[in-house]
């Protein structure tokens, strides 16, 4: 989700392109469920989930989606709502960390041992890679925003349309690649969890953190097709995974809905 977050922060900093932020969130959400989860289900044929999606993650994704819907349905996303989204992100991350400790009580002590071992073999390679990667992502996001602005001018369409389609597809490719690798290595649950977790993070972080930096424009055009489609496909995802099984036909259904939604958005341009 880092590409979505950095792209949205750069969009807000550029002031004139803040409409990219909600388009990016909606488009990534729709793409993650319709395309990524659809490809996962169609490729893996029959998925059986050991963890109960309906316990926390599923309701959390639906709750975050409904909260997003309520907050921007009036065409305005306030600073207070941005703070609320950041608190939602902190709560979700705290839940994940607490769940890890419950499932593996020895994980904390193991982490301490690993950290102590790593400290004794500290090199500057890892921090350098981290800094260089961060710089590359920033300039990539900056170039991405400039490209969106130029394309919008050339095609004479709103920047939000490019964000909700092409940019969302591009920033969702990491989820797709990770999911396909997870399937190939037999970690199907990781692939499904990747989609749900990414959507929760995108709503809370990608929308909340940029709002703390500056105002976000919510174009009315996004409220007509993209926002209802985001809500609909989230509910569809919940119905698909609630029985802990995802079959090939359900994957095909998700892909068809994704194609229909993108077609409707393109037709709206």
Image (tube, rainbow, N blue to C red):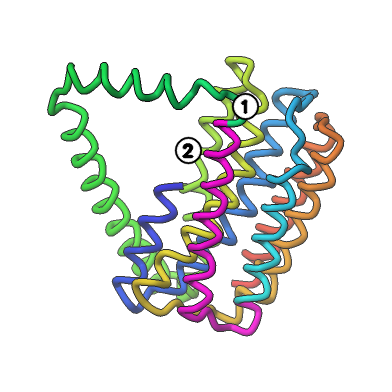
The crowd level at tag 2 (other Cα within 10 Å; few <14, some 14-19, many 20+) is some
**Tag of residue 193:** none
Residue drawn at x 79%, y 39% as measured from the top left: 241
Image quadrant holding the C terminus, namely: bottom right
Image location of residue 96, percent across then percent down? 56, 41
Q: Hey, which quadrant is residue 148 in on the image? A: bottom left
> Gap in Å between the C-alphas at discs 1 and 2?
27 Å
The residue at the far left in this view is 124
What is the number of callouts on the image? 2
Asked if 92 appears above or below 88 in the picture, the reply is above
Asked whether disc 1 touches disc 2, contact meaning CB atoms under 8 Å apart, the reply is no
Residue drawn at x 47%, y 59% as measured from the top left: 206
- Residue 83 belongs to the span the image colors magenta: yes
Image location of residue 110, percent across then percent down? 42, 19
73 horizontally vs 122: left or right: right
Instruction: Look at discs 1 and 2 and give the one toward the viewer.
Output: 1
Residue drawn at x 65%, y 60% as measured from the top left: 64
Residue tagged 2: 174
Image location of residue 122, percent across then percent down? 16, 22
Which secondary structure lies at badge 1? Answer: helix
Residue tagged 1: 103
Image: magenta residue range = 72-101
Image location of residue 210, percent across then percent down? 40, 67
How would you classify the magenta stretch by its main secondary structure?
Answer: helix
Q: Please state which of residues 117 and 146 is positioned toward the viewer in this rendering.
A: 117
Q: Hey, which quadrant is residue 111 in on the image? A: top left
N-terminal of the pair, mark 1 or mark 2, is: 1
The crowd level at tag 1 (other Cα within 10 Å; few <14, some 14-19, many 20+) is few
14 horizontally vs 217: left or right: left
256 horizontally vs 136: left or right: right
Which secondary structure lies at badge 2? Answer: helix
């Amino acid at each position: 989700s880092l590409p979505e977050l950095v792209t949205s922060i750069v969009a807000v900093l550029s002031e004139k392109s803040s409409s990219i932020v909600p388009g990016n969130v909606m488009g990534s959400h729709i793409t993650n469920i319709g395309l990524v989860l659809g490809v996962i289900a169609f490729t893996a044929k029959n998925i059986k989930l050991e963890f109960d999606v309906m316990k926390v993650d599923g309701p959390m994704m639906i709750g975050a989606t409904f909260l997003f819907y309520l907050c921007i349905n009036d065409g305005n996303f306030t600073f207070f709502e941005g703070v609320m989204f950041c608190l939602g992100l902190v709560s979700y991350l705290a839940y994940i960390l607490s769940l890890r400790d419950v499932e593996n009580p020895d994980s904390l002590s193991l982490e301490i041992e690993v950290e102590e071992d790593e400290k004794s073999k500290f090199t500057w390679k890892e921090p350098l890679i981290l800094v260089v990667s961060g710089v590359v992502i920033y300039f990539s996001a900056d170039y991405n925003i400039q490209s969106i602005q130029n394309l919008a001018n050339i095609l004479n369409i709103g920047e939000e349309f490019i964000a909700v389609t092409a940019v969302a597809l591009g920033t969702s490719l990491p989820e797709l690649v990770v999911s396909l690798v997870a399937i190939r290595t037999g970690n199907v649950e990781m692939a499904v969890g990747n989609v749900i977790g990414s959507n929760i993070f995108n709503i809370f972080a990608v929308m909340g953190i940029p709002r703390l930096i500056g105002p976000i424009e919510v174009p009315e055009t996004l409220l007509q097709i993209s926002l209802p489609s985001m809500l609909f496909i989230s509910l569809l995802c919940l119905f698909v995974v609630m029985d802990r099984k995802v079959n090939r036909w359900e994957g095909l259904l998700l892909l068809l809905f994704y194609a229909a939604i993108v077609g409707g958005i393109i037709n709206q341009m």
